[in-house]
Amino acid sequence: MATALITGSSRGIGAAIALRLAKDGFDIALNDLSEDSFKDNDIISKIKEAGVNCEYFCADVSDYAQCEAMVKAITEKMGGLDVLVNNAGITKDGLMARMSEDQYDMVIKVNQKSVFNMMKLCGNIFMKQRHGKIVNLASVAGLYGNPGQINYSASKAAIIGMTKTIAKELGSRNVNVNAVAPGFIKTPMTDKLTDKQREAMLSLIAMKRYGMPEEIAGVVSFLVSDDASYVTGQVIEISGGLSM
């Protein structure tokens, strides 16, 4: 059975992707920073209800050595690796004039460097076995920019460029590399918005609603399936028509 690793997958979009891929028949390797992320959390039991194996692996994916140890542990414990979904990410928002260097550097490190770490390590495995799928989580902020998010927008724009580059580097080895660019998705983060902020955002969306994590997961499911065997280097926007 094929194995999929989803980074930052204890909750939110990452957990939704993990659960969808489990229903598709993949064994699932979950990842987050610490064991605390999986306490009082039913994602593992939900995945196992799909009849697949599920293990969690704690690592800071912005740290190359921790990524290296995690990938080694996954291949040893789960018998291999076939799919990588780079989902882990953070925000530290603020207008550029007020943003600290630490705020900028931390977002770049977690959001962008982690993608390099994981694509390099998993890409080496995929090249040797001559098959593999990589899906990177970008964002509409990386496509169009977003005030107050110069760090986040920079990291997500970089992921788009990285996706296209590695798709070209690994394509001859039958490795597909794509990205999805979610828009406004209903998460605990959007739940904290005021009614005025929520209305302002919804006014920009053609479908006049937020997306759901499961709708991101559905597109990722397609990209890692055999149906997408000739799709690589693409960025699929999932925004309800935000850019129209």
Image (cartoon, grey):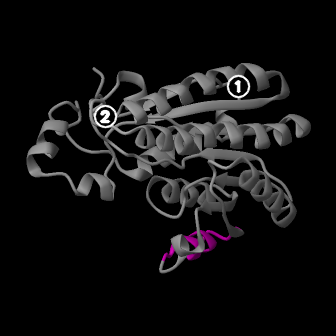
Q: Dot 1 corresponds to which residue? A: 166
Residue at the image point whose x is 68% and y is 61% from the top = 29
Residue 34 lies in what quarter of the image?
bottom right
> Around disc 1, counting alpha carbons within 10 Å, would you say few (fewer than 14), some (14 to 19), or many (20 or more)?
many
Residue that label 2 marks: 240
The residue drawn where x is 22% and y is 43% is: 209
Q: Write the start and end of the magenta stretch as one range.
A: 41-52
State which quarter of the image contains the N terminus: bottom right
Q: Quick check: 230 above or below 104? A: above
Q: Quadrant of residue 27?
A: bottom right
Q: Position of residue 215 (x, y in %)?
A: 42, 46
Badge 1 marks a residue whose secondary structure is helix
Q: Earlier in the sequence, mark 1 or mark 2?
A: 1
The image quarter in which residue 203 lies: top left
Q: Nearer the viewer, residue 198 or 104?
A: 104
Q: Is residue 244 magenta?
A: no
Please name the residue shown 55% across and 30% down the image: 159
- Which element carries disc 2, helix, strand or loop? loop
Residue type for callout 1: Ile
Quadrant of image for the C terminus: top left
View extreme (right): residue: 128
The residue positioned 54% from the left and 45% from the top of the image is 110
Residue 213 place in picture, x, y as percent: 41, 51
Q: Amino acid at mark 2?
A: Gly
Spot the residue most to the left.
Answer: 196
> Can residue 44 be found in the magenta stretch?
yes
Labelled disc at residue 4 = none
